[in-house]
Image (cartoon, grey):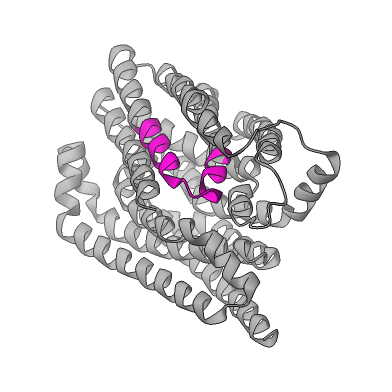
Amino acid sequence: MLWNSAGSITVLACQWLLTIVVVRLSGDYEAAGVLSLALAVYNIFAPISVYRMYVYQVSDVKRENTTGEYLTFRLVTTAIALTALIAYAAITCTPSALPAIILFALYRLSARIIEVLHGADQLNGRMDYIGKSMIAQGVLCFAEFCIVFALTQNLELAIGGMVVVTCLIGLLYDYPRARQFGPIRFGISRKKTHFLLLSCLPIVVAAVACNAAPSVPRQALAFLASDSALGIYTSVAAPVTIVQMGASYLYNPLLSIISADYAAGRKRKLLTTLAKISGGIALIGVVCALGFQLCGAWVLSLLFGPSIEPYTYLLMPAIASTIVCAYFWFLDNMLVALRSFRGSFVSNIGALVASLALSYPFISLWNMNGVSFTCIAAFAIGVLLGVIYLEKLIKEMEGNG
């Protein structure tokens, strides 16, 4: 778990530092805005590639599918996701931003393919492999981006280099280690493909909704204001994502254990684990909120320079939205791990509908802060719906003795 957390934190830190490097090396927020737009578009279609298979895979305690089958299935869904992303970007984004959006998608999707190998590592108790892989991805991709962007000032070339680095790490490090647990034979039957596509479709739609909910107000901000406004908001809000990611480090390594406890009817142990995770998320949120309240403005000015000072008022609402989002992520993953696909679907669709309804009026009223206020309201609705379904699962567990 410590190795996994170290790797995840490294990747998160390096991806956040990209927004600082872009601003520092380019001298304005235009490139940062394009990079943020690329991330926002990618986040909408990433769930199609992932197809919620990581949570499904690491909670596959009965070994219903092989690593090769999960990997083949991921390649199929990734191709579908990339095709849909390109079509969407061509319709909704400016032509000048398309190359960066597509290359950034290739970079992140290549890491998602490697994630299947990480699932095999976790099932076999070797999360140290996962941590080392993510540390290598974070550090080497960040170093490559800094060097290439500094020398060329070409955002597309710098992102393309990250694609190459990620693929090399997957081929040279992750694949040989995953093969230690058994041969990886590519291929999956049509019957299994149809089963996974159909059975997981509700939670995939839910994941698209989950990622679109915060992406919608960001795209609305770029449309109503400018790419520079989005770049400013992203630069301020990026540090607080540590709350979301810190929360995921608490529960992701425990999903296999939670699924096993639920399947075995160990209700007290399950509830104890859920309570500890909830308390841990709350503690992370409080500590981060206090830290950013005391030092956030100073840190932002140190990182981005005096030009960011007029916008530090964006920090606290962004922190609040991140805490609510972190708890929603936790509930959603719990519902998937316990196979309540309907609960995941309903709660995520509720959050997306709220985001669509509130983005434009909130941004028109509060400008950049409207993004944070939209996310707070949308994910609060999602949390309420998720709690209702989780309570139902626990009651059914009690009823089964």
Task: Tell me where residue 190 sits by quadrant.
Answer: top right
Does 82 appear in magenta? no
Q: Which secondary structure dominates the residues rendered in magenta?
A: helix
* Residue 208 or residue 273, whichever sits in front: 273
Where is 233 relative to 86, above or below?
below
How far across and down, in percent of the image, does residue 352 sit? 59, 58
**In the image shown, does 62 or 298 lie closer to the viewer?**
62
Q: Left or right: where does residue 304 sit relative to residue 191?
A: left
Which residue, as the protein is rendered here, is positioned at the far top? 152
Q: Residue furthest right?
A: 191
Asked whether residue 47 is in view, the answer is yes
Q: Nearer the viewer, residue 246 or 46?
A: 246
Q: Is residue 45 left or right of residue 12?
A: right
Residue 28, position in %: x, y?
28, 29
In magenta segment, residue 132 = yes
Residue 94's place in the image compared with 379, above or below, is: above
Residue 164 horizontal side relative to residue 151, left or right? right
Q: Where's the C terminus, which quadrant?
A: bottom right
Name the residue nearer the viewer: 32 or 256.
256
Name the residue located 63 percent from the left edge and 66 percent from the top edge.
338
Give, as a single range, the part of the protein colored magenta. Answer: 116-138
- Is residue 350 something one can see in this rendering? no
Above or below: residue 296 compared with residue 74: below
Q: Is residue 256 above or below residue 383?
A: above
Q: Quadrant of residue 149?
A: top left
Residue 185 percent across, percent down from the top left: 70, 31
Q: Residue at x 67, y 64 (%)?
A: 339
* Total number of numbered discs in the rendering: 0
Q: Residue at x 63, y 48 (%)?
A: 53
Pinpoint residue 74: horizontal percent, then vertical percent.
66, 37
* Quadrant of the rendered image containing residue 157: top left
Q: Is residue 298 left or right of residue 184?
A: left
